[in-house]
Image (cartoon, helix red, strand yellow):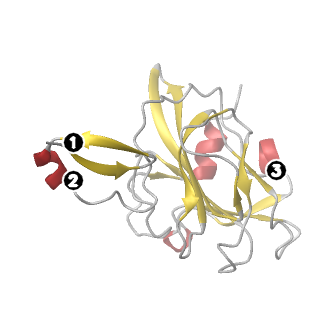
Amino acid sequence: MFAWTLWGCGVAPMEPAQAVAEARLPELGAPAPGPVPPPVADGFDFPVGPPDASGYYDAQPFGRNTHLGADWNAVTGGNTDLGAPVHVVAHGVVTFAADIGGGWGNVVRVRHRYEEEGSLRDVESLYGHLDRVDVAPGEVLERGATVGTIGDAHRNYIAHLHFEVRSVVGLPVGPGYAADSTGYLDPTGFLQAHRPK
C-alpha cells in the first residue's frame, strides 16, 4: 500500500511509515526538491540595473535593523521602479516561484553553483515583493534573465526589490529580519566579491 503526498510541483509515492512521518506539506515558500543541478556560474551581477545596479541604491543594507537582505530602490524614488525588470544574478535553477502573500507577495528563489578555491559551492538567491513572476520552478536560467518585476507586495510597501543571498540553500522564507543571520550572506558584499571575470 502506498500513500501520496504533494511536494513542490509533483506527487510521489511513499511507503506508509514515511507517509506518516512526512504527512505535512512543506513550509509555504520552501523550494521544491528537484533533480536538476544548477549550471556553474561564470560570475554574479546585480539584480537591478544590470550589471552594476545602475540607477538603483540599497535603501536598507544587510544587517541594518537586523535586515537579512538588501532593499533595492530606483534613485528616482517613490514607486517609479514599480514594474521594472528584476534579473537573476547568475546562472541557476528556479526552485520556487509563487505568491506567498503577507509581507512577501510574489517570491522567486534560485539555486546557484559557483567555483571558489577549487571547490564547487551552492548559494540561493531570493527575490521578494515582486509585482510579476516570469519564471517557473525547474527552469534553468542564464545570468541576466528576467525573473519578474519590482513590486510592492500587493501595496504593503513602496515599490522595491527585497533581495537575499543565502549560504544555506532551502532555508524557510523567514521574516526578512532576524538577529541571527546564520545561513545568510551580505548580498552586496557577495555579489561584489564574485563579479564576472
| For residue 10, side relative to residue 151 (left or right) | left
Q: Secondary structure at mark 1?
A: strand
Crowd band around label 3 with a 10 angstrom C-alpha radius: few (<14), some (14–19), many (20+): some
Figure disc tally = 3
Q: Residue furthest bottom?
A: 156
Left/right of residue 90 with respect to residue 22 in the rendered view: right
Residue in view at x 48 percent, y 30 percent: 36
- Amino acid type, callout 2: Glu
Q: Residues within 10 Å of mark 1 (few under 14, many from 20)?
A: some
Q: Position of residue 95 (x, y in %)?
A: 50, 44
Q: Amino acid at mark 3?
A: Gly
Q: Which residue is mark 1?
A: 14
| Percent position of residue 127, x then y | 61, 56
Closer to the camera: disc 2 or disc 3?
Answer: 2
Q: Is residue 161 depicted above or below 142 in this figure?
A: below
Q: Which mark is residue 22?
A: 2
Q: Are the residues tagged 1 and 2 within 8 Å (C-beta)? A: yes
Question: Identity of the amino acid at label 1?
Answer: Met
In the displayed orientation, state which residue is furthest to the front: 1
Classify the position of the N terminus by image quarter.
top left
